[in-house]
Amino acid sequence: MIVSKWVTIGGLVTLSILTFVVTLVVPTEVKSSSKVTLHSAYKGVGTLTNVTPNRTHWGGIYWGHSFNDSMSGFLHKAVWNCPAAADIADGQVTFKGYCTLTDADGNKVFGDWSGSGPLTGEITGRLKMTGGSRRYATIKGSLDFQCKGVGTDDQLFCTQQVEYELP
């Protein structure tokens, strides 16, 4: 009785490991160049510093995830890590920062980004891809974004138009 339980558990563990290994061995298909539309959600965590009565600085990080319209391929199911700084003055915000995007296969894309807009409206900007790891080590491209705050907890929903090339 005890042996059959362990055999069953061992079989399940072996099956789980094989499924994990097969997932790692079969990478997601990515074209050498393309235009892709992404949809992302982010949570900002940071610190506000009042500089003057009309100016505030924010420093922190945005964490998020994205999917693309085709539901597969480039940056589908990617996670984002984007440290940033913002200058907020007279109802306008200007952001600057960096991002590391990690796809479902563990490949990374690095980028510098900036954006601006009304504090309570749509923020627009661009991320310039500056390189990456493994599959994306030589990537070139850009990502134009439009983001809008959702709720009252420093959350954003964004749409991005991506053009990239893997030379």
Image (tube, rainbow, N blue to C red):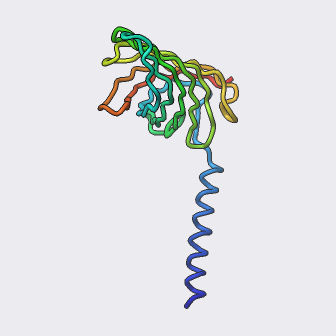
Classify 52 as above or below 20. above
Position of residue 166 measured from the top left corner of the image (x, y, whole percent): 65, 25
Give how far across and how far down residue 158 sits, in percent.
Answer: 40, 27
- 65 versus 161 height, above or below: below
Q: Say which residue appears at 62% left-offset and 69% top-offset.
A: 14
**Taking 118 as reference, is 2 above or below it?**
below
**95 or 65, nearer to the observer:** 95
Q: Looking at the picture, how far across and down is residue 102, in whole percent?
A: 58, 37
Compared with 69, 115 (above or below) is above
> Residue 147, position in %: x, y?
38, 23
Q: Is residue 111 left or right of residue 61?
A: right
Which quadrant: the C terminus?
Answer: top right
| Quarter-of-image position of residue 53 | top left
The N terminus, quarter of image: bottom right
Q: How many marks?
A: 0
Image quadrant in which you'd find residue 44 = top left
Q: Is residue 122 left or right of residue 57?
A: left
Which residue occupies 54% across, 27% down? 83
Q: Residue furthest bottom?
A: 1
**Relative to the observer, which residue lies in front, 121 or 7?**
121
> Which residue is at the front of the view, 65 or 97?
97
For image coordinates 57% across by 23% down, the residue present is 98
Residue drawn at point x = 42 percent, y = 34 percent: 43
Rendered image quadrant of residue 31: top right
